[in-house]
Image: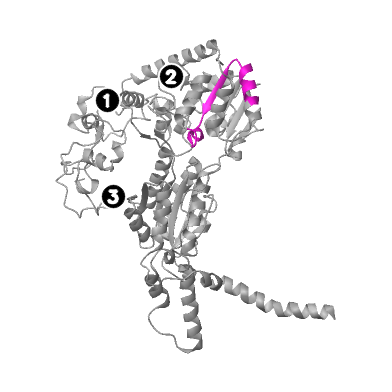
Amino acid sequence: MDLISIACAVLLALPVVALMALAHRLGLLYQLFHKVDPQSPRHGGELVAEVLKAHGVRFIFTLAGGHISPVLVASEKVGIRVVDTRHEATAVFAADAVSRISGRIGVAVVTAGPGVTNTVTAVKNAQMAESPLLLIGGAAASLQKGRGALQDIDQLSLFRTLCKATPSVRTVRDIVPTLRKAIAAAQSGTPGPVFVELPIDVLYPFHVVQKEITGTKSARGLRGKVVQWYLQNYIRNLFAGAWAPQDVSPLPVKVPLATEDEVQRCAELLSRATKPLVLVGSQALLPPTPAEELRAALEALGVPCYLGGAARGLLPPNSPILLRQSRREALREADLVLLAGAVCDFRLSYGRLFGRGAAIVAVNRDRAQLLRNSDVFWKARLAVQGDAASFVVRLARSLPGYGCSGEWLQRLRERERSKEQENREKAAIPTEQHLNPLELLQTLDELLPAESLLVADGGDFVGTAAYIVRPRRPLAWLDPGEEPSGSWDRGRRGGSSKLIQFQRGHWDAPSRVQPGMLHPNRAAHPRVPPLPRLQAEHPMEPITPCPSLRKVPPCPPHVEDTRAGCSTQVGPHQAEQRGRIPSLDLLRLPHPTRASLGIIPTHAQGPCPRSHCSP
């Protein structure tokens, strides 16, 4: 009897449980305690702007689209500067750069479909550069996904292998907690990009969403009334509890730290070493340790240092422990190498550069990067999964009064001076045509102001620049994340030979290329030879100066537009004051100097847009 009673009770309870689960799924239970205000003009974009403002975001990079317009409008209202770009990848690249320089989360907002897919390369770049980046992408309404909605594609699948998190917001009330968690995930551990999908129906006001989803026609028949009720309930659940007060402050960021035992073991290895060496990578410049504190720790240790990536410029150019040349030979001779955020990938020949018996101490937040190619070409004596900068600071504090061998440092400095003299001699080699890249880079290094910001992208030329041009401050060298081999000196022997040996057939231009002046003021700088002007095989109209800029619609006051269809017609100095720095003005050289180098034309009305000039 008892078993029968229990079975009957279970059978009676199953429908109740099923109904409760269905009510929860439809949001009916939540709507009992959280009312909806159909008359409210507020929209989800305001919540996005509040979260970004609370996290210290000052810039949003975008290419405007209807799916994301509420975010841009609300952000502008709270004082966040909206910068419009010509391409979605450019928006993400810019957000990546802001993140690296400022230490805050970089934010890019793009529209649905092709707007999202256009960002893939830039997001992968941010992942490899370990940049905390928030990419917000518009999307079709959740109810309309898979039904042929405008620009409806599976966007989350594209980013699952590129991003640390890929959430999709389902209701307006979920915007704030989802963004807070996503930003914390981007900054925690090994930083990287996150992608947050915001469907269009969570961003627009109630009355707009209701009109688009339910339509204006009244339902007919039982089936029509059921569908109408379902749609109305969907909208109510979408906005239920949307405007209830929520905490928008940043969540704690989790940064892995080394243990005291690991710091002490490294201190013991360093105290016994006679020829130590430190390689500092970009990861060492990540928050929370200030760059000034890391520099003070390195100077206190007095161990010779090679800097790579964003760490270049961490030590002043005249620092006695800073090395840039002959890294291969130094690694062969060192008996202890501390990899502070540096990775044994192609930049270090996969770990084949270390001498036999050398003690290798590797510190990295990412375990995969920490042990890259280990037990193949090298093996770490001590592998620490933790923040590199704080590890170096704690190491310096644990060794008060430590001093590196003066004989070892002197040997490295002599080799450094010899290599720099060799580069100066190669820079003095005359060329019949084109430029001597070493001479160009040395001239650039001489002219660089202290506040210069260098963007480096390329192969051998950037590899040569890495050991010629000296950034004047930390975080002033931006590269794609995995910089070319030259950023750690030369990754292989003769890696930059084609930049130095000018041989016929390799550097000579075709016969139709004749020497000429790019700009008449170019001769004002004697060290830079004239550039060639291409002459067509058939006669053509001569190149004429750029005419006056045609009048185009002015930019809206709240949007910094860099597209060709919108111009404020200002000169380069005015553009710098407004933050619209032309791409070749990143070096921030004085305008007469740039003109004399032939970098920019000297038009009275500013840089000459290509579309406004004759061929």
Q: Say what amino acid the circle numbered 1 marks.
A: Val
Q: Residue at x 54, y 53 (%)?
A: 160
Tag 3 or tag 1, which sits nearer the N-term? 1
**Amino acid residing under circle 2:** Ser
* Residue linked to disc 2: 319
In the depicted structure, whether residue 496 falls above or below residue 84: above
Q: Is residue 303 visible?
A: no
Quarter of the image with the C terminus in it:
top left
Left or right: residue 514 compared with residue 70:
left
Residue occupied by mark 1 = 528
Image coordinates for residue 514, horizontal then vertical, percent: 24, 32
Q: Secondary structure at mark 3?
A: strand
Q: Position of residue 388 (x, y in %)?
A: 55, 32
Quarter of the image for the N terminus: give it. Answer: bottom right
Q: Secondary structure at mark 1?
A: loop
Q: Can you say whether 131 is above or below 42 in the image?
A: above
Magenta residues span: 264-289
Q: What is the number of callouts on the image? A: 3
